[in-house]
Amino acid sequence: MGASDLPIGVFDSGIGGLTVVKQLKKILPKENIVYLGDTARVPYGTRSKKVIEEFALEDLRFLLKRKVKCVVVACNTVSALALKKVKDNSSMVVFGMINPANAKALKTSKNKKIGLVGTRATVGSNAYKNIYMKRHASLLVPLVEEGITKGPELDIFIKKYFKDFKGKVDTLILGCTHYPIIKKSIEKYLGQNITLVDPAEEIAKEVKKYLKDNNLLNIQKMKGKTEYHLTDLNPRFLKTANNFLGNTNTAISFKQVAI
Ligand code: DGL
């Protein structure tokens, strides 16, 4: 088995990273993926750097044991607080959510007034460069996980968290795995003067470029398979997971693992 046949390893604090899997599958349909979501300990975004680093290393070790060809940190919080730690402890190439999103935002912004929304930890981290305005939107994670992905209840929180950006920035980084799911409602509220950057789309493009440049693309004829692993099979997550993958027809099967 050559390196190109190995799966891409993806981890996140929970099921949010499935929004990254969705983008990877879209542009790299032949790749096999091994996903780990640490649902037993989600959220990470409310925790300290030290704890986020510890959890991230455990997630990483799980993927390294599975033999993967690269590691995708599909969690903005881990990418912002612990990417160096993960890279220092990995023999593999590791991708994080921050740089590709930051680069896209700089390219997109005309006035270089870039906004950032994310978890408390991400927003407090200074991992992003050239950010004009930032704020956490902590309640959006539990809302989305409760399946509140559109409608008046969601709109109240969108207004609360996004109103300060209006008229101030022309580009806004959606720096949390859960926000792409409610992108339409955010777009509707902000209007056309603010362009949204989805880090999940940007990291997927970066992974594709890396695999291509290094002859690591899987050249099999069939569509790739994804193995989904969670540290807790809570029915609440299982119910919303399909939503994150944007895939409502196929039932996904998750395996419970200890890390
Ligand atoms: N996956 C996290 C992120 O992208 C959101 C959920 C959490 O706080 O763990 O920041």
Image: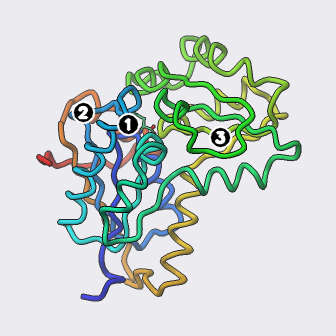
Residue 49 marker: 1
Q: In this view, does 30 lie above or below 140?
A: below
Quadrant in the rendering for residue 153: top right
Q: Which quadrant of the picture is home to ligand 1?
A: top left
**Residue 150, position as x, y percentages in the image:** 55, 23
**N-term-proximal mark, 1 vs 2:** 2
> Residue under circle 3?
173
* Sequence-wise first label, 3 or 2: 2
**Ligand 1 within 8 Å of the CB at mark 3:** no
Instruction: Farthest residue to the right: give it.
Output: 111
How many angstroms separate mark 1 from mark 2 (CA)?
15 Å
Q: What residue type is labelled 3?
A: Ile
Closer to us: mark 3 or mark 1? 1
Q: How packed is label 1: few (under 14 Cα within 10 Å), some, or many (20 or more)?
A: some
Label drawn at residue 41: 2
**Helix, strand or loop for disc 2:** loop
Residue at coordinates 34% horizontally, 74% vertically from top-left?
Answer: 69
Identify the residue at horizontal 35%, vertical 39% (top origin): 241
Which amino acid does the dot numbered 1 rest on? Lys
